Image (cartoon, coloured by chain):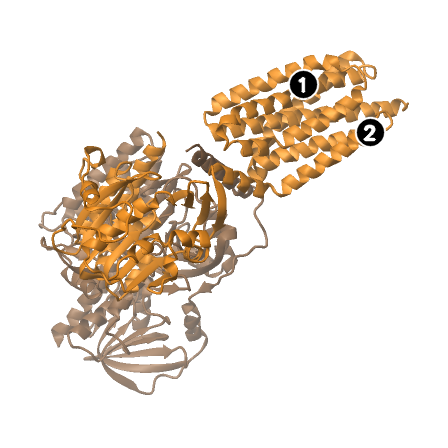
Chain colours: A orange, B brown
Amino acid sequence: MRNTAGRNSAQWVLLVAVFIIATCGLIYELVAGTLASYLLGDSVTQFSIIIGVYLFSMGIGSYLSRFFNDHLLEWFIRIELLVGLVGGFSAILLFLVFPLAFSFQPVLYALVGVTGILVGIEIPLLLRILKDKVEFAELVSRVFTYDYIGALLASLIFPLIFVPYLGLIRTSLFFGLLNVGVGLYLCRYFAGEVRGVTAIRFGGILILIAEVAAFIFSEQIMSFSETLAYNDHVVYSTSTPYQRIVITKNKHDLRLYLNNNLQFSSADEYRYHEALVHPAMTAAAEPRHVLILGGGDGLAAREILKYKSVRNIQLVDLDPGMTKLFTGQDILAEINRHSLKDPRVTVTNADAFIWLKENKKQFDCVIIDFPDPSGFSVGKLYTTAFYRLLKTAMTPQAVAVVQSTSPYVAPKSFWCVNETLKASGFQTIPYHNYVPSFGEWGYVMALQSGAYQLPDTFAIEKKYISQAVMEQMLQFPNDMLAHEPLEVNKLNNQALVNYFEKEWSKFLDQ
Amino acid sequence: MKRGKFIRLTTGMAVAAPLLHACGEPKRGTAVPGRIVGSSAAAGHLLRDHTFNPPATFEAKEVVIIGAGVSGLSAARHLVQRGVKDIIVLDLEEQPGGNAASGGNAFSKYPWGAHYVPVPNNNLTEYLSFLEEARVITGYDQAGLPVYDEFYVCHDPEERLYINGHWQEGLVPNFGLNAAELAEFKQFFVLIDHFKKLKGSDGLDAFSIPVDTSSRDESLRALDRVTMKGWMDSQQLTSEYIRWYVDYCTRDDFGTPYDMVSAWAGIHYFASRKGKGANAAHNDVLTWEQGNGFLIEALRKNLGGKIVTGALATSVKGSGDSVRISYLDVASRRLQGLEARHCIVAVPQFVAARLLGDTERKNAVTDHFHYVPWMVANLTVRDLHERGGQPASWDNVIYGSASLGYVDATHQQLQQRKDRRNLTYYLPLTHTSPEAARKEAYGTEHAFWAEKVLSDLQRVHPDIREQTDRIDIMLWGHAMVQPRPGMVHGEARKSLSESIGGTIHFAHTDLAGVSIFEEGFYQGLKAARKILQQT
C-alpha cells in the first residue's frame, strides 16, 4: 500500500478524472444535439430530447452501478475507455448513418443513451472507490464540484473553440482521445492495484490508435459520408477552379452534379437534350454551322451530330475539367457517344461572354445550355447585352435556343428570359417538357425573323420528340404563367437573378 | 433540402474560425507589398533646388494649354474640332488625365481618381455629343432619349452599405433604422425633389449643371451663405443616420464634410441630376474599369502628338497680343519657351497665380480657395470573406468609416471567374485643416497608409490581410477645391475666371466651385470658345 501522501495524490488523480469525464460527457451530448439540429432541423426539439435522454441514461447508469461489486478500479478504467470509444466515434457514426435516413434517429438515441449510461456508472463507482479514503461529506462535495465545473467548461469551449476550429468530427474524436488518455494514465498510475492491467492497456492503446487515425483522416471520412448522401455510389469527383464535379452511379442511372446541382441523369437526359436541340435545329433548316455555349458534357453535341447537314460544331465551355472528363472518361464518353472527339466538333474552353464578344463567325443554330441564373455572375449570361451579342453571331435565318429553368417552379424567371430575348430583338417560341429527374423544364427558342412553323417531322433518330409532342410542348397551362408584367433582364438590373432566387428558395422551403 | 441546410450551416461554422481569429492579436510582420505612386512633387522640388537658364528661343504656337486634365483636354478637343490645330497641351504628370488618372495591372485597369459620371442631364448637348463620339451613347430612341452602351452603365449589384452588422442594398441607410429615422430620409428626399423641380425668379433651374447656368435668385443664393449642417438643422433633419448620409455624400463629391460645405453646393449634389436615357435613369451611373480614365482617352483621341507630358510650366507672361510660356522639360532638365496667340491655363488657381507671378491673385486664392488632400489606394485581392447581406457590389461603403469605402474596378468585367479583383479605396483627408493634412500625408510612408486601409476594411472582410496581394497608394495634395459657403456665389471665383488681356484664359473645375466631370468639360469648352470668337 501507498503511504498517506500517495493516497492523497491518488485521490486527486481520480478527481481530475471526474472532471475530464464530466467535460467529455457533456461534449458528446452537445455533439449529438448539434448534429441532430443540423441534420434534422428543429433545434429546440433535438436538444430537448437529447438532453432528456442523456440525463435519463445517466440515471440508468447510476442504478446499474450497484451491480459492480468487485474490482471497482478496473471497472472504472474499462468504462473510461469505453466512453472514449463510443463518444469519440459518435460524430463519425452519425454522419455515416445519416444518409440511411430510416435508421438515423434510433442510432442517435442509442448512442446518447449508451454514453449517458457509461458516464452515469462512473460517478457512483468513483464515490465508492474513494469512500474509504476520504470523509463522506468532503468526498461528495469534491466529486460533484468537479463534475459540474467540467460541465461548465464543456459548454463554453464547445461552441467557442472546438466547433469553429475542429468541426464536429474532430471535436468528438479529440475528447474521445482525452477519455482514453485518462484511462491509460490511470492504468499506469494504479498499475499495482489493477488486475489484468496489460489487457486493459492493450485495449486502450488500440482505441487510441484508431482515434488518432480517424482524426487525421476526418476529411476523407467526411467526403465518404458525402458519397453516401447522394444515395448512390460516387464514381468520380473533382474540384476545378470553376466548380465541383460529382458523378454518381447506381444500377439504374448515372448522374452528373455541378456544385451539388443535378445536371443530368442518364436515364432521362434524352428528354432534356432532344427537347433542347431538335426544335431549334429543325427550325433552322439545314444548319451547317452550329454553336453550343455551355454543354461541356457533349450531350447536346451528340444530338446535333445526328444531322447530316452539320459541317462543324463550335462548343464553348468555361471548364476544361468538364470537357476533358467527357472526352476522355469511357463511361461518360459512351453516354455522349464520343461526340467531343468527333472531327466536326471544336471544343474551346473560354468564358462565353468574352468569347462571344471577340467572335467574328456566324452560326446557323446556337444551343445555349448554361447553369441556372442563380447568381450575379451567371446572371450576366441571360441579359440583353449578352443576347445582342448573340444576335451578331447568328446568320439571318439562324435559330437559337436557351435553357430557361423550370416554368413550373420559377414561372417569372422563365418568362423573364422570354421577355429579355424579345427585348433583344428576337421573335421567341417558349416551350417546355417533363424530365423526370428535373421536373417540368423550360426552353425559349429565339428566331431572327419569320414566323415559326411546326415541323412535319423530326427526321433523326430519337426516343422522345415528335410533331405531336412538339405541339404539346408549346402549350402552357395557367400554373406556368407569370401573371404579372415582368422586367427585362439587363446588366444594370439583374432582374432575373432576383426572380430566380425568390422563386427557387420558396420552392425549396416547402 | 436538409442536406442543403446542413451544408450552409457547416459553411457558416467554417467561416466563424477566421472571424474569431480576427478578434485576436493583429498579425505582425506581414506587410503587404506596394508603393506610393505619382511623384510630381519631386519635379516641383527640382525647380526649388536648382536654377535653370531661361529659354533661349520661344517656339511659336497658336494656342498653348497648360494642364491635361478634363478642362484642358476638353478645350484642346474643341479647338482641334474647329480647325485650330497648332496647339500644344503641357502636363507635369507622365500620364494626362488630372483627377481622372488611371492605372492598371494584369487583372484590370483601375482609377486613381474620379471613377464614374452620372447619367448626363439631357440639356447638355455638347457633352452628349462628346459621349456619342466616345461611343458611350450608341444612338437615340424614338422619344429622343440617348441609348447608353449597356457595357458602360453600372452593372447590378451597384451599391451596398455595411450598417448595423449587415450589408444592405443601396447607400441610403435603412437597415436597423426606426420609423422616425426613416421618416427623416423621406422628408429629406421630398425636399430634394422640390429643389429638383424648382425654378428661380429668373426662370432658370434652381440647381443646374454647369453651376453657372443655375438660377441667381436671391432666395437660393442665400443657401450659399450657410453650411449644409446649418440648413439641415433648420429643417430639423437631425438623426445620426441622415447626418452621416449627407456628410458621406458631400465628402464623396466635394471632399468636404457637411458642416463645412455650402448648403447650396450640398443641395446641388442631390438636386442637379435630372438626366434620363432610353435605358438609364438619373440615378444610374456610367463607369469603366479605369474610371473616368476612359473618358480621358476619348477626349485625347484626336490630340496625338499635341500633348507634352513631363512638362512643368514655370511662367506665363502676356505681352500685347501674345503670351510667352516657359516650362521645364523634366527629363532633360531644361527650360523651354513657347510663344502663343492664346494660352489656356487649365490648372488649379494656386498654380495659375504662381505661373502669372501675380501677388494679388495669389492672395485672392489663399483667402477663398481651399484644396483638400485625398488618399486613394488600389488593392489587388483574392476572394474575400463576406459578411451577410447584399453580395459584393460596385460601390461598397462602410457606415461610420472615415473612408468612402471602395469601388471594384473589375465590376464591369463580364467573365464568370475573376482570379483577382482590383479595389479602389478612397479617403478624403478631412480630419484636420487641408494644410495640416497635406503636410502629414507627405510625411507618411506606404506602410502607414496600407495599415490604415487594411484595418478599415478588416471590419467587413476579416481575411483582407491574408487575401491582399498588393496595395499601391496615390496621394493627391490638392485633389479638389472645397465649395465652402461663399465659394459658388461669391465674387472671387468670378473675378479669377476672367481672361487677361484677351490672350490668357482660365479653365478649371475650381473656378466652377464643384469638381465634377461636366464642369471640367464645360470650363474647357468655354475657354476654347473665347479663343474661337477672336479668330
Residue at image position (18%, 77%) is: B84
Residue at image position (55%, 56%) is: B31
Is residue A137 visible in this depiction of the protein? Answer: yes
Q: Name the amino acid, label 1.
A: Gly
Left or right position of A458 against A236 = left
Say above or below: A105 vs B150: above
As drawn, the label of residue A120 is 1
- On-image quarter of the C terminus of chain A: top left
Left or right position of B469 against B27 = left
Say above or below: A52 vs A306: above
Q: Name the amino acid, label 2.
A: Val
Which one is earlier in the sequence, the residue at label 2 or at label 1?
Answer: 1
Q: Residues within 10 Å of mark 1 (few under 14, many from 20)?
A: many
Say above or below: B320 vs A459: below
Closer to us: A110 or A152: A110
Left or right position of A292 against A232 = left
Residue B525 image-quadrant placement: bottom left
Closer to us: B160 or B72: B160
